[in-house]
Amino acid sequence: MQFTMKFLKELSIYETVQPYKLHGFPDLSVEQQTNCVFEEIEHVVAEDVRGSENKGRIEEEGFEFTKVPTRCALSAEVFERDSLDNIVRDYIQETMDLVRERLNARFVVTIDWRVMHYSRLTVYHY
């Protein structure tokens, strides 16, 4: 399948300044809220990667798939609840430990991806 998608434009400013977008500052102009400039790229190929999970490496692709058994009792119902219970908290911690070990990172930040409103955003760091 092919799509037209927006990507962050490769600008020289991003060599010295990280792209950013601020949320929750309605009094700022659009120019003050972000330095992101996007461009549309046509004919982007989307592929089903199931069965090819071992091909991508973070060093080359910027992402990778990792399949690791979890110690957490996961089910769809656990992730559909609005409350942050111990199962989700343990799963987030387990994921942070995995990322820290895989990337030899000193600092890892995750968010509770189930939250769609920034005022209720839960951020974890390790």
Image (tube, rainbow, N blue to C red):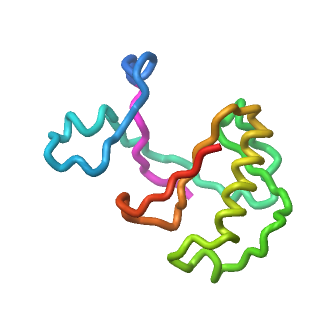
Which part of the image, by quadrant, shows the C terminus? top right
7 magenta-colored:
yes
Q: Is residue 40 above or below residue 120?
A: above
Nearest the viewer among 96 and 29 is 96
Q: Please give the name of the residue rendered at 30% of the width and 32% of the height, measured from the top-left corner.
A: 35
How many numbered discs, if any? 0
Which part of the image, by quadrant, shows the N terminus? bottom right
Nearest the viewer among 14 and 87 is 87
Q: Give the residues drawn in magenta, as a range.
A: 1-10
In this picture, residue 48 sits left or right of residue 72? left
Q: Where residue 81 sits: x, y (%)?
A: 55, 79
Quarter holding residue 56:
top right
Nearest the viewer among 37 and 90 is 90
Quarter holding residue 16:
top left
Q: Please give the name of the residue rendered at 25% of the width and 39% of the height, measured from the top-left corner.
A: 33
Q: Where residue 70 sits: x, y (%)?
A: 82, 64
